[in-house]
Amino acid sequence: MECEQKFQREIKLPKIEPPVDFTHRFGRCNYSKDAQLEINNHYEVEYLNQNKAENHFMIRVNPIKYKIKRFPRLSDTTQTYTLNDGTEAIFGTTPRRMLFNVLVFEKDGWQYIISSDRRSVTITGDVLVQVANSI
């Protein structure tokens, strides 16, 4: 709610989570009125399991004005999905050292980046799409 107040608009989050156990859930609002720092404004939710490192899931919500461009990179894009509402979503990977699968799409003036640890055999691209469809 704090982030919605700062951005002066609603941030819709998924109604479902991936089908794995999480022991911790963290949310963070990055917001600055400083014009030089505005580009970093976003809301982020992170889900972790302290006993299973591969159970790592994140949602980052950027205002379209400050969306991350060319992400995932075209060379990393593995599939394009169409969400239930007709929105196009791009599935790909982060650079090798970070090891995340990502699903990126735009909805209601926000850019959503939904990601999961690539080591997870449960949280696949199809699961990320299911989560995205629940927004």
Image (cartoon, rainbow, N blue to C red):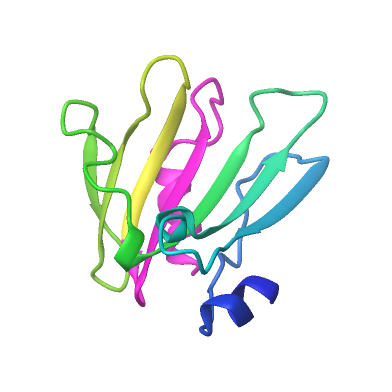
Q: Residue at x 34, y 70 (%)?
A: 107
**Which quadrant of the view contains residue 132?**
bottom left
- Residue 86: give x, y in percent of width and height: 23, 70
* Residue 131 image position (x, y, % from top left): 50, 56
Query: What residue lies at 25% left-to-right and 66% top-to-bottom?
Result: 87
**Residue drawn at x 59%, y 77% as measured from the top left:** 6
Residue 59 image position (x, y, % from top left): 54, 51
Residue at (62, 71) in percent of width and height: 3
Residue 62 vs residue 75, the one in the foreground: 62
Quadrant of the frame with the N terminus: bottom right
In screen coordinates, is 134 left or right of 18? left
Residue 80 painted magenta:
no
Residue 41 as seen in the image, left or right of residue 77:
right
Specify the segment rendered in magenta. Answer: 106-135
- In this view, the residue in front, 92 or 82, is 92
Nearest to the observer: residue 39 or residue 131: 39
In the picture, measured across the screen, residue 32 lies left or right of residue 105, that is right
The percent coordinates of residue 25 (x first, y second) are 76, 49
The vertical placement of 22 against 106, above or below, is above
Question: Is 134 inside the magenta-drawn segment?
Answer: yes
